Amino acid sequence: MTPNVLHNRVILRQLAQSSDNAVMQTTVVTPDLAAALLPSPNPVQLLDPTGAEVTQQGTRRPYAMPTPERLREVWRAMVIGRRFDIQATALTKQGRLAVYPSSRGQEACQVGVTTSMRSGDWLFPTYRDSMAVVTRGVDPMETLTQMRGVEHCGYDPKVHKTAPQCTPLSTQLIHAAGAAYGEKRRGTDNVAVAFIGDGATSEGDFHEALNFAAVFEAPAVFFVQNNKYAISVPLSKQTKAPALAYKGIGYGVASEQVDGNDPAAVVAVMDVALEHCRSGKGPFLIEAHTYRLDAHTNADDATRYRSSDEVTAWLERDPIARLEAWLKAHGALNDDIVAATHAEAEQVASDLRDKMNAEATTDPMSLFDNVFEQRTPQLEDARRMLAAEIAADAEMEDHK
């Protein structure tokens, strides 16, 4: 038996005996407990599409309006994030990126979630969450390294507390549940936040992650960006649930649904979810109702499965315009700040273009970095084999 296998078995045995024998206890489901798990019957909304405040009706939890100062920072990050996203899409059309899944239209989710987190929290993004990664503080060029095809991940996950962007559907949720449980065992109040798309909720890993996190009360927020399509498959062919947020109750996970194009509501719901996790109440599931304005990726033709009228209707629910109107009405934003922020966003795009003009360099030996904390004997063998091949090639070049 290898040391790794033995170590894993020890961990599994400890898990089975932990959490005060939680797996051996029987919970009596009272109406109050069930109500505490259920999401609100309608998505939480604090601002309507025009930017006017709305009265909360029927929400299962109280949600406080974030301060104008805080929301102004959210607006700023959304403006920069959208410009970054548009620039990345243009770079893909120019052939400088192999692929890019745009998140234009989902800025409230990408930015609202990320700015609500603390520096010690972990973020587990999908392939569509480049804007969130940039908002987290990762250099835009490093963020796009994977999309460029240069490296599996262009930034250090430990430094940024941000996992590599995940392309296989839902597998990052398993990682998030494990990381959250690890933080709990260490005695911290850090939370793991994982993004997921609506189509990925059909994957087994989604259900396994929720079940594990619930049983072991792992402080994880699972944030579903329901943008209505899993590539070309509409939500109606993914589930018969009244909303994806209702999937939490089957695992004992508190859940909520929110207007994903309302930045104020996203921040308010995230605040409640994060506090729920930090206070030891276990995981939280959020479904954000939003929309991707662009195609699934540059290789997709969205006109084959949705109408232009549908896209136009969602353009009218623009999260940036919505929050900008509210901020101006409350005296927290003026034309000078708007102009300066857009100039800042243009500079981010310009810097990214300049960096993309440089030829990418790769080190083949980096393939073996960040695979395991300590390289296994098999990985060391492969590393020595590649090093020998590189040395042999270099020697041949010297003799030419």
Image (tube, rainbow, N blue to C red):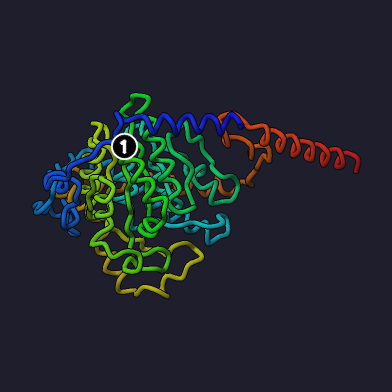
- 241 above or below 66? below
Left or right position of 59 against 380: left
Under circle 1, the secondary element is helix
Q: Could you say which is closer to the camera, residue 88 or residue 22? A: 22
* Residue 198 in the image, given as x and y percentages of width and height: 35, 58
Q: Could you say which is closer to the camera, residue 186 or residue 307? A: 186
Q: Could you say which is closer to the camera, residue 57 or residue 10? A: 10
User: Which residue is painted at 45% across and 54% down in the image?
Assistant: 169
* Residue 246 in the image, given as x and y percentages of width and height: 24, 55
- 279 above or below 322? above
User: Which residue is painted at 17% across and 50% down in the image?
Assistant: 326
Left or right position of 72 against 166: left
Instruction: Say which quarter of the image contains residue 193.
Output: top left
User: Which residue is painted at 12% across and 48% down in the image?
Assistant: 31
- 91 above or below 254? below
Q: Which part of the image, by quadrant, shows the C terminus?
A: top right
* Residue 64 in the image, given as x and y percentages of width and height: 14, 42
Instruction: Say which quarter of the image contains residue 22.
Output: top left
Left or right position of 335 against 209: left
Q: Amino acid at mark 1?
A: Val
Q: Which residue is mark 1?
A: 23
Q: Which part of the image, by quadrant, shows the N terminus?
A: top right
Q: Work out whether residue 265 can be spotted.
A: yes
* Residue 314 in the image, given as x and y percentages of width and height: 28, 65
Left or right position of 65 against 304: left
Q: Work out whether residue 330 can be spotted.
A: no
